Image (cartoon, rainbow, N blue to C red):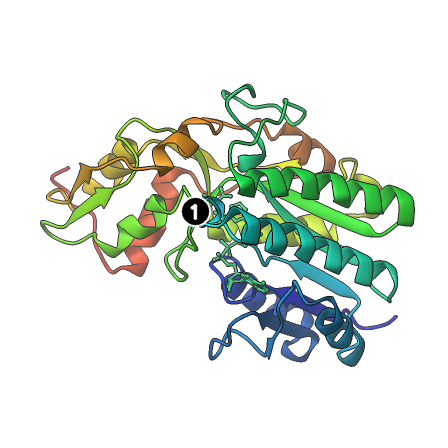
Amino acid sequence: MEDTRILVTGAAGQLGSLLCIALQQKYGVKNVVRSDIKLVSGKVDILLDVTDVDAIKTVIHNHDINEVYHLAAILSANGEKNPILTWKVNMDGWLNILETSRKSNINKIFYPSSIAVYGNNSPLSETDQFGYQDPSTIYGITKSAGEYWAQYYFEKYGIDIRSLRYPGLISVDSKAGGGTTDYAVEIFDYVKKDGVYECFLSAETRLPMLYMDDAISATIQLMEAPKEAIKIRTSYNLVGMDFTPEELLNEIQKYEPSFSIKYFPDHRQAIADSWPKSINDEHAAADWGWNPYFTIEEMVSEIMQKLNIKKDNAK
Ligand code: NAD
Ligand code: AKB
């Protein structure tokens, strides 16, 4: 059997930098080629701009790649600053990966989608796998179209493309990259006695979220599932929890009672308001056994351990 030889695009990002560690542990350091448009020491092996199709071909050929994790993208909030560039990176970049894969030895691809495919006219509570998509951002438009391109290349060319519709991903070991859910990552940089976080969403904005460890487990579990188990070839709904900034604050205050949030909602509020409040991911559970581990309580407890902050027993 040939070795799994993986190319990761966007490897320096919030997800990529941690997913690459898990892939290296699983497949061996030499079998994971970490690429990004920027060189970040310890996170990126080679420079690769996904809008450059010739560069993609060369890397896939020179490194004998047979699997791709295509993470490179511009996220929701940053995308609104430059919609045309966002289309170019997210859509042309994805088509470059798909076309190069079709013409080479690539047999499996991971493609991350997002809850951003849903929007104002979608069902926003317990949003169903097949709920109407109505993306409100250029990012969501590219992710929605990208899902259908994934299904098209699977059906027409037989490439085994698998995808997850991630909610907001929360990590402390890597920084968020310019999205609407970033507050739930940034906030932990401010947690200390009498610390204050200035939140760009309102106190009651509910959004679906997932702790990074669960996101990485889900990704690997999906990619390892038997081919016949994967019944959805657009992208699977996936979630771990949902909460508001105020609920996250209450959980953090169990450890740091004097910590507080000041609310200054900005342009990202409208994006958040158009996204699901909660997600139904029963197809992921039924098809390949998805079962998240982290609740908000377990996540905050784990993060506080990492930050070396102990529970305040008075709370
Ligand atoms: P990120 O912004 O942290 O990282 C994206 C990376 O892509 C960056 O390192 C950036 O340098 C790179 N990049 C940008 N343009 C590029 C180009 N032209 N060529 C090559 N690389 C380029 O994003 P992330 O949070 O790590 O997200 C990874 C993937 O997961 C994205 O596709 C994103 O849409 C998806 N996703 C993330 C979340 C989340 O909450 N983090 C949620 C849903 C979906
Ligand atoms: C963003 O906020 O843009 C991302 C996402 C949910 O896709 N975190």
Q: Tell me, yes or no, if residue 17 can be seen here.
A: yes
Q: Tell me, yes or no, if residue 288 can be seen here.
A: no
- Horizontally, residue 205 falls left or right of residue 124, namely left
Q: Which residue is mark 1?
A: 179
Q: Secondary structure at mark 1?
A: loop
- Is residue 215 or residue 234 the one in the foreground? 234
Q: Residue at x 55, y 41 (%)?
A: 138
Residue 39 appears at what percent x and percent y?
Answer: 51, 76
Q: Residue at x 15, y 43 (%)?
A: 313
Q: Quadrant of residue 277?
A: top left
Residue 72 appears at what percent x and percent y?
Answer: 59, 59
Q: Report the number of numbered marks.
A: 1
Q: Is residue 33 above or below residue 272?
A: below
Residue 291 appears at what percent x and percent y?
Answer: 58, 38
Q: Residue at x 62, y 72 (%)?
A: 48
- Dot 1 surroundings within 10 Å: few (below 14), some, or many (20 or more)? some
Q: Residue at x 46, y 44 (%)?
A: 80
**Label 1 beta carbon within 8 A of ligand 2:** yes
